[in-house]
Amino acid sequence: MNISTALSTTLITLALLFYSTGVWAERISRYLKKWHLAMFWTGFFFDVSGTWAMGRISDAPFNILDLHTLTGQIALWLMLIHAIWATIVVRKGLENSRKQFHKYSLIVWLIWLVPYFGGMIMGMKH
């Protein structure tokens, strides 16, 4: 494995670690906290960084007709919307939303896993 591949897979795995921590900690507590936001945003940052790094080593980066690229783009946009929405909920002190937010977090996380594991499977085939 070359250094570029190692870097990109490390970044994406850090995204999985931080995003999963935020989503599952929020789900267990059943209340959206500020530190969950930090986990969402950190996971998003690592996902964007890993996606960028993978795009640099790809023969056809960001080919939207590719299923992995399409699901990855959908997941990134959902993560961004999720993090922005969570930030708004916390900043405005929307208590009912803070107590219900975990339901939406899990859906976004499950969708995010599709390109994560799809990319892993693709990587093992090479």
Image (tube, grey):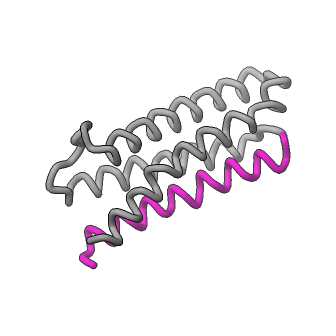
- The residue shown at (67%, 39%) is 105
Q: Quadrant of the N terminus?
A: bottom left
- The residue shown at (49%, 45%) is 44
Q: Is residue 52 above or below residue 83?
A: below
Q: Nearest the camera: 117 or 15?
A: 117
Q: Nearest the camera: 25 or 68?
A: 68
Q: Is residue 29 above or below residue 86?
A: below
Range of magenta residues: 1-30
Say which quarter of the image contains residue 96.
Answer: top right
- The residue shown at (14%, 55%) is 59
Q: Residue 104, position in %: x, y? A: 68, 34
Q: Is residue 71 left or right of residue 106?
A: left
Per the image, is 20 magenta? yes
Q: Is residue 24 above or below residue 122?
A: above
Q: Is residue 27 left or right of residue 61?
A: right
The residue lying furthest to the left in this view is 59
**Magenta stretch prevailing secondary structure:** helix
Say which quarter of the image contains residue 41.
Answer: top right
Q: Is residue 118 left or right of residue 23?
A: left
Q: Quadrant of the C terminus?
A: bottom left
Q: Nearest the camera: 32 or 67?
A: 67
Per the image, is 115 magenta? no
Q: Residue 83, position in %: x, y? A: 58, 35
Number of numbered discs = 0
Q: Residue 49, position in %: x, y? A: 37, 52
